[in-house]
Amino acid sequence: QVQLVETGGGLVQEGGSLRLSCAASGRTFSDYNMGWFRQAPGKVRDFVALIGATEHPTYYADSVKGRFTISRDNSNIYLQMSSLKTEDTAVYYCNAGNSLGVPVHPGPYWGQGTEVAVSS
């Protein structure tokens, strides 16, 4: 079992920045690929960024490339979001155990989500 807790969401103006954090506990965190997913109102949950367990390769959805950066340390993953757009408004979820590359398959472990709202 892996427990995940996201923090860092909030309200920000378009063009602004936010940093999301996800604290992991439980089984060996370093063994897991990790990822950020998001779900906007009325839409399906979709992947945003992934980071591998070893050598930490990263993958990004086309919509966030060049604006978002995923990283990890011993027990956390982060999502640095810059140049935010109104279409980035969503609940952001941390995920553990996902596949890497396309198609993306989420892992079995999810956090409770943190809400990001971008105003124009």
Image (cartoon, rainbow, N blue to C red):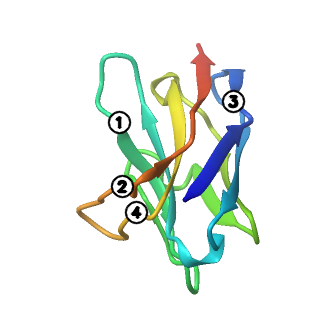
Q: Is residue 106 above or below residue 90?
A: below
Mark 2 falls on what kind of element?
Answer: loop
Q: Residue at x 29, y 59 (%)?
A: 105
Residue 117: image quadrant is top right
Count of marks placed on residues:
4
Q: Nearer the viewer, residue 2 or 5?
A: 2
Q: Which residue is mark 2?
A: 106
Dot 2, how many residues are within 10 Å of its Cα: few (below 14), some (14-19), or many (20+)?
many
Q: Which residue is mark 3?
A: 9
Name the side, left or right, on which 67 lies relative to 72: left
Determine the residue located farthest toward the left in the rendered image. 103
Which circle's residue, 3 or 4, is located before the other in the chain?
Answer: 3
Q: Residue at x 57, y 33 (%)?
A: 113
What's the CA distance linking mark 3 and mark 1?
17 Å
What's the CA distance linking mark 3 and mark 4?
22 Å
Which circle's residue, 2 or 3, is located before the other in the chain?
Answer: 3
Q: Is residue 81 visible?
A: no
Q: Is residue 19 visible?
A: yes
Disc on res. 45: 1
What's the CA distance linking mark 1 and mark 4?
14 Å
Give the position of the N terminus as an image quadrant: bottom right
Which of label 1 and label 4 is nearer to you?
4
Q: Is residue 112 above or below residue 49?
A: above
Circles 1 and 2, Cβ within 8 Å, touching? The answer is yes
Three-letter amino acid code at disc 2?
Pro
Three-letter amino acid code at disc 4?
Asn
Q: Is residue 88 above or below residue 64?
A: above
Which of label 2 and label 3 is nearer to you?
2
Which circle's residue, 3 or 1, is located before the other in the chain?
Answer: 3
Dot 1, how many residues are within 10 Å of its Cα: few (below 14), some (14-19), or many (20+)?
some
Q: Which residue is mark 4?
A: 98
Circles 4 and 2, Cβ within 8 Å, touching? The answer is yes
